[in-house]
Image (tube, grey):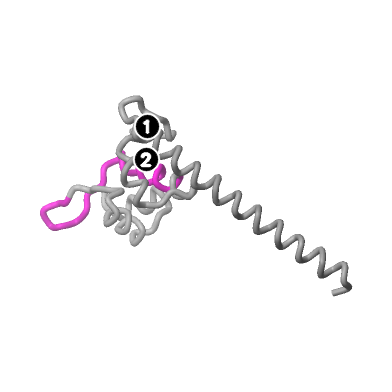
Amino acid sequence: MRIGDLARETGVSRRLLRYYEEQGLLQPARLGNGYRDYAETDVARVNHVRALLAAGISTMVIAKVVHCVHDKDDLTLPAECPAFVGVIRDERDRVTEAIAQLESSRAILDTILETATRDGT
């Protein structure tokens, strides 16, 4: 399938699909004329990449684990790719730390607002 077909199937722009290729997330075959030739499995791969990006994982990290995901519909953890679990755990820990920092920031802002409104501002 051509890049325009993949873009229509996934709702991802051609430009973004080319970026995914640059990042090693997609590896389309090349036709004799130089055009990209995507497989049906690339539709699922793009959907998995989008899900991992939505989870806050960088393309650099996704490139390390996306080859592990073979299921068409779900992001499952295959037994033959134990590194996937470790990478996802590390990312979860990173997100948990970011949440803690944001909650601390919010508490400080709440204190400032409480003080400011109490003083009649």
- Amino acid, disc 2: Ala
Whether label 2 touches label 1, CB < 8 Å = yes
Asked which secondary structure carries label 2, the reply is helix
Residue at the disc numbered 1:
71
Q: Position of residue 95 (x, y in %)?
A: 52, 47
Q: Nearer the viewer, residue 111 or 4?
A: 111
**Is 55 left or right of 26, judged from the image as shown?**
right
Left or right: 108, with 54 as reference point: right
**Residue behind mark 2:** 44
Rendered location of residue 15, percent (x, y) = 34, 62
For the residue pair 41 and 80, the one nearer the viewer reads as: 80
Q: Is residue 82 magenta?
A: no
Could you tell me which quadrant the C terminus lies in?
bottom right
Magenta residue check for 39? yes
Quarter of image, res 34: bottom left
Q: Which residues are magenta?
A: 30-51
Mark 2 neighbour density, 10 Å: few (under 14) some (14–19) many (20 or more): many
**Which is more toward the observer, 57 or 110?**
110
**Residue at far top of view:** 79
**Residue type, numbered disc 1:** Asp
Describe residue 18's horizontal placement relative to residue 106 as left or right: left
Question: Quick one: SS at disc 1?
Answer: loop
Residue displayed at 48% across by 50% down: 56
Q: Position of residue 68 (x, y in %)?
A: 32, 35
Image x and y of residue 48, in percent: 40, 42
